Image (cartoon, helix red, strand yellow):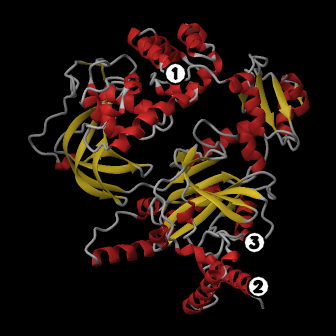
Amino acid sequence: MDYKAKIEALRTELRTHNHSYYVLDMPTISDYEFDMKLKELQQLEDAHPDCFDPSSPTLRVGGTITKDFETVVHGERMYSLDNSYSKEDLEDWEKRIQRILGDVEVQYTCELKYDGASINLTYENGRLLRAVTRGDGFQGDDVTNNIKTIKSVPLQLTGDYPPKFDIRGEIILTLEGFAKMNQERLANGEEAYMNPRNTASGSLKLQDSSLVAQRPLECLLYSIVGKDLNFDTQFDMLEKARQWGFKVPQVAQLCKTTKEVMDFVELWDQKRHDLPYETDGVVVKVNTLRYQEELGYTAKAPRWAMAYKFKAEQVATVLKEITYQVGRTGAITPVANLEPVLLAGTTVKRASLHNADQIAKLDIREGDTVFVEKGGEIIPKIISVDVNKRPKDSQPTVYSTHCPECETELLRKEGEAQHFCSNDSGCPPQITGRIQHFISRKAMDIEGLGGETVELLFKEGLISNYADLYELTVEQVIPLERMAEKSAENLVNGVAASKEIPFERVLFALGIRYVGETVAKKLAKAYKNIEALMQANHEELVAVDEIGERIAESVVQFFGDSTNLALVHRLKSYGLQFTLSEEQLQNQSDSLKGKTFVVSGVFESLSRTELKKLIEDNGGKVSSSISSKTSFLVAGDKMGPSKRTKAENLGVPIITEQDFLGMV
């Protein structure tokens, strides 16, 4: 056998053994035999560099140094999940599904919700091409070199995999592996890690991949994204992933009713403590992929999936002091400062009290013993007070009447839950908060500039609003604490580069109250440029799709303020984008304005997502369910009969994909 054939034979054999050990948990040879074969392969590869293969088993040991992780935009957005905590929540969700799908039989796939770090793996021609963290859902960090060290991630697939696809899952640390890591750290005189989830997440951003290789990380997969995938259901998808070589837990179950779903939830709420890794709930998904596509997404989450969260852990501790935080909009948030307590793997020192009504409702007082849990096991919150342990000299909480930062008297508008500081131009946290929002990743994403630097620039008098950023010079920035020449240059260059950020993100960055990412896109699409938006009145704004009274009032108020107008004019003079790009304008028209479409079925030349975007780009509105207000039902192959029947009963025109393309 020549050396090339020997190398390939060893690679194939080692991949098989690796899959048996790390994915199937069924080792076929001893660790010593595996190590000897790996060593033999390494020696052959070193002697014959012409046989280099990026998916070789020898490359799992790490050693690559990554100082700056490249930001990569996800091909398909990674959404969050809506949460449920009761059988009633699940039944309400099922009713919403049936309102959209009509009278069809819906089955559900139940999977455990793994508590780790989300990852997106891209495979091309069966080889791992790229691994990207979830990030903000739209873009994440390229951590391919670190992911390659995880033994349960296949570098080369087997079977009938498609040419290119993304697969998503969770990077986790087993409880046994986590305990072993901490034993080693304590033996070396180092501080123990707090919990497996944060440790797994932090591992992905280690600069030295050889350190990642030393950690017992695993990758559990649960979702495939791509075109021309050879399966019709979520359950089949999981089985296909197993066949291709991925580690997919076998506990997933197909359920026909919400009662069966609840049986699965109750079973694993008890058995989860016997699992080798942490889980905090069950993810319930509509099983049929065609129905998933038809249900689509809200602004934040898929309509076809729901996370049922297990009951959160609770602990008791003492509330030492109530303080008040000022947000960028002037909203005041009361904060409970607690005696530190360990909760769900992290030390909790503070918890939000939300507003004055919440404090009054629970009669929360300083010195109280309170019960704390993590809302969704993420954000600490106080759920009740142990009044039996209340100090005898306890006094009811009197909510603050003045801003803790600038002493301005607090206001509370009718219908508002929170108190506000009205001194928006002179209250430091509001000023720096607006600037920090402006530079944030989803807004201007200014490289080299973070929250601490904003605070420092403000403190030194170099900026007092976000427009001042565009006048900063390297010479001004260098003298600042912890700021070298290179850092100063990166900051100034990052500010200059942000002038290319598109209009909808600049609009979001301005910090208009109630104008989030989605609303900013709607307004940018409707008005095309900032001048038209500034001149819009309340009535015109409300007429824009999904723009309500509150948003319209806020937009009019923002542009009615001379200070805000001056800032916008300054930003325009610096060259920021305040109009849609030529490409965006060319792709848009008002030809479908006033028309509402429901899209259902499978289409030939466009995906459902592309078809919906085409509707919105041309001024139309997409709805998920048919009503008397529906203008057209765009019907594709395999559309549910109930939708057709409902459209016919309501007299809604049913058109084909080609009919629609003729309209635009």
Q: Which residue is mark 1?
A: 575
Name the residue type under label 1. Gly
Q: Is residue 78 visible?
A: yes
> Could you tell me residue 478's position as x and y percent?
30, 38
> Could you tell me residue 637's position as x and y percent?
88, 42
Looking at marks 3 and 1 on the same chain, the residue that comes earlier in the sequence is marked by: 3
Looking at marks 2 and 1 on the same chain, the residue that comes earlier in the sequence is marked by: 2
Dot 3, how many residues are within 10 Å of its Cα: few (below 14), some (14-19), or many (20+)? some
The structure residue drawn at horizontal position 38% and vertical position 33%, both measured from the top left corner, is 436
Q: Nearer the viewer, residue 324 or 305?
A: 324
Position of residue 129 in the picture relative to residue 175 (left or right): right
Tell me, yes or no, whether the two marked residues, 2 and 3, touch with CB atoms within 8 Å: no
Name the residue type under label 3. Thr
Q: From mark 3 to mark 1, how far is it between C-alphas?
A: 52 Å
Position of residue 187 in the picture relative to residue 543 (left or right): left
Looking at marks 2 and 3 on the same chain, the residue that comes earlier in the sequence is marked by: 2
Q: Which residue is mark 3?
A: 158
> Could you tell me residue 384's position as x and y percent?
30, 45
